[in-house]
Image (cartoon, grey):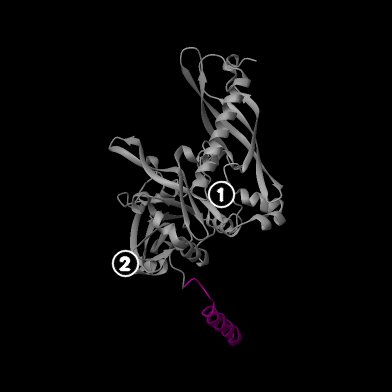
């Protein structure tokens, strides 16, 4: 080899030492992965609950420890949420990766007096977190909700809190809200947002006893400067019918006959919602127009499509008004009617708005017009039970 060739080889070897590599990257197995964060507020201090996930067991690798817990919860307190998280770092022996964080859970006290705003701002600014983090509220102990595992011991990433849309095609009671949607909603009229309310129940059983599972039980109403309260259970049912994103819902109506009352459960699909503001001087009313399809479930006797339409229309209308009036009790525009006026007639909105929203009363919804496109009997085998 000539001296020139030797010099070239030495130069190439020397150059490779200057190339950047992955020397500063932490190996995946040497990190903890944050899946969810719970936040409580008491005695002027935040309590941060960090749920970390065992990805080794999720992937079911040969090196996975079958006895290891799929998730673990750590907690720490601080005057700010950042201080609490830094205290958690001190009790951990690996670096935490935040890029897989999927949900943020607030206690009731953490949403009062603008406490939630500082927390939301923290996770929006942090470079590792995403805007598509789901947001929930609860009155249950935070740790009880975070320790719930999926049915049939599926991966922790399959929990309802991490993937709230898994069952939306079958039941769309409450629409999930992520950080991006929450911030937009708080910054635009009516400056209020509905946050899914989560609780823990024991509807399931295993051979070892009752099995807890998370359950969407209503919504909490958060404004830009306060927490207004909850709308739960049947009182929240109207939210489902005033939302274009509803994939499928059910409503049960009573059918009278000569001897006793029977009940019919109807699936509602393909919901189309239109809200029209009607401005007259300094007064504004809202006309609601709903269109959807229905599918009948099991029932006895014979029915006509007209009977079904009348019963379902009446029940849906009642549920919408009930939810609207529950919102009025806490001074909440639960259907965001103010935004409909803002989008269609901003001049009228500017003239009528107070603190970013339109004053509402029980008479603000002047009309609810419901049109059922189709009444389907379900399987064709039982079509004879629907008579004309």
Left or right of 293, for residue 298 = left
Count of numbered labels shown in the rendering? 2
Nearer to me, 127 or 139:
139
Q: Secondary structure at mark 2?
A: loop
Task: For the C terminus, give its image quadrant.
Answer: top right
Nearer to me, 67 or 42:
42
Q: Which residue is mark 1?
A: 333
Task: For the N terminus, give its image quadrant.
Answer: bottom right
Q: Which residues are magenta?
A: 1-23
Measured from the top left, where is residue 257 in percent x and y?
51, 15
| Residue located 57% across and 38% down the image | 241
Nearer to me, 295 or 324:
324
Q: Is residue 305 magenta?
A: no
Q: Which residue is mark 2?
A: 91
Measured from the top left, where is residue 152 in percent x and y?
38, 40
| Residue located 51% across and 73% down the image | 21
Q: Secondary structure at mark 1?
A: loop
Q: Is residue 184 above or below residue 257?
A: below
Measured from the top left, where is residue 140 in percent x and y?
36, 49
């Amino acid at each position: 080899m000539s001296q020139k060739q030797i010099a070239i080889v030495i130069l190439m070897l020397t150059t490779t030492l200057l190339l950047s590599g992955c020397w500063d990257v932490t190996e995946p197995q040497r990190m903890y992965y944050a899946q969810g964060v719970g936040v409580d507020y008491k005695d002027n201090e935040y309590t941060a609950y960090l749920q970390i996930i065992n990805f080794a067991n999720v992937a079911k690798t040969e090196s996975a420890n079958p006895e290891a817990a799929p998730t673990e919860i750590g907690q720490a307190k601080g005057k700010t949420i950042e201080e609490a998280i830094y205290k958690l770092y001190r009790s951990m022996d690996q670096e935490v990766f935040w890029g897989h964080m999927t949900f943020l859970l607030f206690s009731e006290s953490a949403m009062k007096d603008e406490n939630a705003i500082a927390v939301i701002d923290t996770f929006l600014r942090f470079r590792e977190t995403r805007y598509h983090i789901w947001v929930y509220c609860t009155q249950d102990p935070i740790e009880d909700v975070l320790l719930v595992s999926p049915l049939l011991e599926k991966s922790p990433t399959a929990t309802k809190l991490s993937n709230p849309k898994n069952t939306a095609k079958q039941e769309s009671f409450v629409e999930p809200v992520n950080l991006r949607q929450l911030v937009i909603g708080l910054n635009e009229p009516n400056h209020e947002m509905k946050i899914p309310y989560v609780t823990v129940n024991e509807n399931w059983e295993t051979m070892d006893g009752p099995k807890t599972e998370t359950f969407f039980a209503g919504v909490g109403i958060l404004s830009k400067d306060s927490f207004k309260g909850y709308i739960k259970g049947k009182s929240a049912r109207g939210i489902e019918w005033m939302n274009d994103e509803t994939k499928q819902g059910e409503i049960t109506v009573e059918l009278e006959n000569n001897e006793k009352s029977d009940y019919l459960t109807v699936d509602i699909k393909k919901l189309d919602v239109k809200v029209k503001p009607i401005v007259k001087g300094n007064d504004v009313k809202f006309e609601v127009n709903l269109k959807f399809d229905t599918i009948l479930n099991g029932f006895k006797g014979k029915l006509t499509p007209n009977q079904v339409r009348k019963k379902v229309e009446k029940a849906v209308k009642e549920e919408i008004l009930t939810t609207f009036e529950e919102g009025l009790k806490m001074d909440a525009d639960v259907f965001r009617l103010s935004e409909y006026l803002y989008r269609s007639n901003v001049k009228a909105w500017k003239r009528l708005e107070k603190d970013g929203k339109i004053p509402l009363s029980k008479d603000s919804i002047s009309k609810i017009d419901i049109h059922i496109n189709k009444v389907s009997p379900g399987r064709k085998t039982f079509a004879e039970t629907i008579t004309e």
